[in-house]
Image (spheres, grey):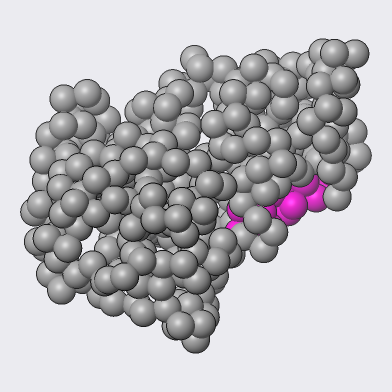
Amino acid sequence: MKRITLAALLCSAALSGMAHAETVILAHAQPPGNPRSLAADFFAEKVAACSNGSLTVSVAGAATMGDDVEALTSTSANVIQMTANSQGATAQIVPELNVIGLPFLFADAPTAWSVIDGDIRGMIDERAQAAGLKLLGFWDNGIRHVTHLSKSITTPADLEGVKIRTPPDDMTISIFNTLKANPAPLTFAELPTALQSGVFEAQENPLTNIYSSKLHEITKYISLTGHKYETSPLLASMAWWASLSPEDQACVQQSADEATAFQRDTAQKAETEVRAKLEAEGATITELADRQAFIDATAPVYEEWRERFPELVDRIVAEARK
């Protein structure tokens, strides 16, 4: 797998404009071994095969091309071609994406996939294209849970006043404001230091991200709140996508579809395995004492977001509850 530096990339861009580059840069922020990282490598192999080598994907992982926001900015500006990003960061550009993260909307990840792979994806892709991005698929970023430095979270009252780190995600901030916590956004790369220094008492992530980034070594109290589901959108520069031949577009989309299936399967298996690993490594894992109390407490979030996107909220809620 070929990796490049930002300086080399910018030099190449200056020389060729990158519009018809044979090398496709796919950036993401996750460490090696994370399902997003594994799927990015899988995608690179599939593109090389179906393009007969005319397209080569260089994966820049572990935030080597910047954090999610920086990778998105570079992709929409066609400085790089692709990013496997986060829902929160992407929603800053495509705000409709926030509604996928409505609290307690999906019972599990497969239920979420069945909803977001239909008309919802088409609606969000249309908005993304207007922002210079082509949505190639929704990779999985799991059901999210709260971890804390010193206590388990089992009731809504346990979150009151808690300083909790969130992604730059308006929906997550809405949820924790409604639960009377004290949320604030911070980039993922800065999170461990912020927890160790006491800037935050808590954070929230899927179990796989918690384990792969060793967050359980800092915040060993893991509460299975399951407060929201998130995707990891696979996005391409719209300018680069439009420059491809129909054959290359078909190759990239086919590879994206196969990588989406691979990533979701990998994420589900990792989620099952990682709980035992977390407990074996000293994490304290607890279930909610009263899940319905959290559902009731976050009900105002639905009304807040229905005011912004009434059609989309009603559509996704109806499909999730079929």
- Name which residue lies at 83% across and 35% down: 5
Vertical position of residue 103 compared to residue 268: above or below: above
The residue at the point 52 percent across, 53 percent down is: 193
Residue 241: image location, x then y, percent: 68, 22
**Residue at image x 59%, y 23%?**
73
Q: Is residue 37 above or below residue 120?
A: below
Is residue 189 rendered to the left or right of residue 320? right
- Tell me which corner region of the image, top left, top right, bottom left or bottom right, holds residue 318: top left
Q: Nearer the viewer, residue 282 or 58?
A: 282
299 or 286: nearer the eye?
A: 286
Residue appearing at x 79%, y 30% in the figure: 6
Q: Quadrant of residue 78?
A: top right
Per the picture, the main secondary structure of the magenta-coloured stretch is: helix
Residue 265: x percent and y percent?
56, 63
**Which residue is at the front of the view, 179 or 310?**
179
Residue numbers of the magenta segment: 35-49
